[in-house]
Image (tube, coloured by chain):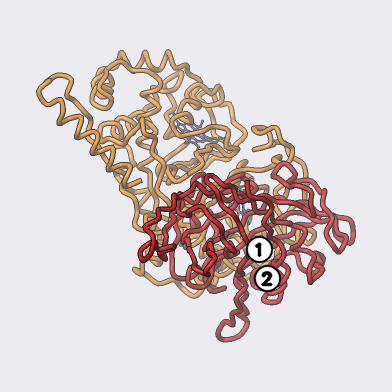
Amino acid sequence: MKRFVLIILITIAFLSCDDTGNEIIPSTNIVFNFTHSWDGTEVTNADFNTIKFTNEKGDNLSITKLRYLISRITFIGAAGEELKLSGYNLVDVTNNSGLTYDLQNAVPSGSYKNVKFTFGFNNSDNYNNNYQDLNSASWNVPEMLGGGYHYMQLEGKFENNTNAEQGYAYHAIRAVDNSGSSPVFQDTFFEVNLGAVDLTNNSTITIEMNIAEWFKNPYTWDLSQLNSALMPNFDAQVLMFENGQNVFSLKSID
Amino acid sequence: MKKKVLNIIVIVSFICASCTDESVESYAPTPSALDTPKLFDDNIIAPVIPNDNAQTLEGIALGKKLFFDPMLSGNNTQACADCHAPQNAFSDAARFSDGIDGSLGKRNSMPLFNLAWNYDEKFFWDGNTFSLEHQAFVPVTDPLEMKSSWSDVTQKLQNHQEYPSLFEQAFGTSEIDSTLVTKAIAQFERTLISANSKFDKFLLGETELTPEETNGFNVFMDEARGDCFHCHGSDKNPLWTDNAFHNNGLDETFTDLGLGAVTGDPADNGKFRTPSLRNLAFTAPYMHDGRFSTLEDVINHYSEGLKSSPTIDPLMKKVAQGGVGLTEKDKADLKAFLLTLTDYDFINNPDFNQN
């Protein structure tokens, strides 16, 4: 689990300096840095395992595990041309791994009007590949729910209505209703747009996940109703998708 | 890892080639790449083999001999294999194993297989020892186990008729020390691969499951029923363990702190490493302290017997009701599924048995 082999391939030729200038734009050493907060207060794994957060509904809770997958980082240039990176990164906050993701000199410096990535996997990435590193990390979704991979595992304890500690497992996957004769799916991966960036050599793009957002907006998450066995719960998955829309933001570029 | 092994082979053969004319120093043991199962190669990342202890035929053979040799114990009565017997998938049938003078440890002996795929290399129930090589140092001097000293053991081996030449063949030196002993044992241990159960054959398309076994697998994979797969592997993680540490709700208070005693973090109290579910037919009793003698006991624990404590894993659902409350049919089928992970070829493999 220590080292995920990060394979980054440029899939679409970019800024093809072919026709006009033979201008050579130096590749830069760009790194993504994943940070986490609870409504503005920084969260690291040192904050795990104690009940110290309060969600929108007012439930006190702890985090014991947080890991999530991002994929398909894409840089969009001024003229709309796209530099798509394949590859993916499992951010494991619990074990402090995957918090930085090195783009391996695949991205030239310059101004981009947008940077985006996919939270989770899109369907073709999710179902058409067998990822050995993710399998080894027990990141799979059972075949009965369509297979593929988790997008996120957020786990911890909350104080329930009787003030007892109860576990929750907020696991995000592609929404599936398998109660009928054939499963019904709805896409719940989503694109995160970070906005415009100016990259120089050795830029670090710092992204922040506000964990509180998962419980907040538009749906005020009620842990007493939705705490476990959420993977087979179609509606819960759609709510996670909706609440996830404003979870990520661009914090800084250094 | 295949690649790594290949590199090693290439390097070794390069060394061989480069010194063909310096007759005496040219000896190198015979590389013996791990025979990794297709199911593992297809689905999970490569095994861990340290750069400074490549697998060789001579090293493995020596490690095997040492593993079965009671000379490693203080009074020459106990071998590793006494507590790690092939017919028990390299565990033993006792709740706690006796050391050479009958003293009992406080933990159940662990089965030994697929150890090279423990990627974090944290060994023992509480993960207190990093790497297989280091692990092998421990039992020899443990007063509750083999109760010997390394100076004693190495001296006995040095004075033995065969061992000096076996070390010569394995490592190019007949001067025996504890590091070489543990390297040889670790090489042998890495060859203990179990991947030929009925379920493996099912995954390879070579056999069918019964309807009961199929339902049992579904109970295992269903988040609303057994929900075992988050910790115990799956068809895509055929180790059948995450090799991580969890509190699975055995106790309200802990006599053995497990991982917590190793890290000093109270949030780790009562956490133990998830055991693989392969070969359960041979490894009773179960759990770190061998408290359950049957698989029914284990399944009842998860279904009704969970005990709450501050560090219990959030995946242990419905603790207030004792657990997920499986039906009798689901319990029986879950057991039938678990037993499809039994690998008879593994326990009968002549390479792993004393001969």
Q: Chain of mark 1?
A: A
Tell me where residue A159 appears, x and y as whole percent.
85, 56
Secondary structure of residue under mark 2? helix
Task: Please state if A55 lies on the left or on the right of B49 as rendered.
Answer: right
Camera-side residue: A153 or A251? A251
- Residue B274 in view here: no
Which comes before the other along the chain, label 1 or label 2?
1
Q: Chain of mark 2?
A: A
Identified at 54% across, 50% down, the residue is A101
Q: Position of residue B177 (x, y in %)?
A: 37, 18
Judge depth for marks 1 and 2 and give the one in front: 2
Which residue appears at 76% of the width and 62% of the height?
A213
Chain letter for the part of the structure drawn in red: A
Residue in view at x 29 percent, y 44 percent: B350
Give the x, y percent position of residue B332.
58, 67
Residue at position x 48%, y 72% in the image: A124
Q: Quadrant of the N terminus of chain B?
A: top left
Position of residue B343 relative to residue B325, above or below, is above
| B351 lies left or right of A103 | left
Amino acid type, residue under disc 1 in the picture: His
Q: Nearer the viewer, residue A133 or A37?
A: A37
Res A170 → quadrant: bottom right
Residue A171 marker: 1
- What's the residue type where badge 2 is placed? Phe
Disc number placed over residue A241 in the picture, else none: 2
Asked whether, in this view, residue B19 is left or right of residue B342, the answer is: left
Question: Looking at the colours in the rendered structure, which chain would you say is drawn in orange?
Answer: B
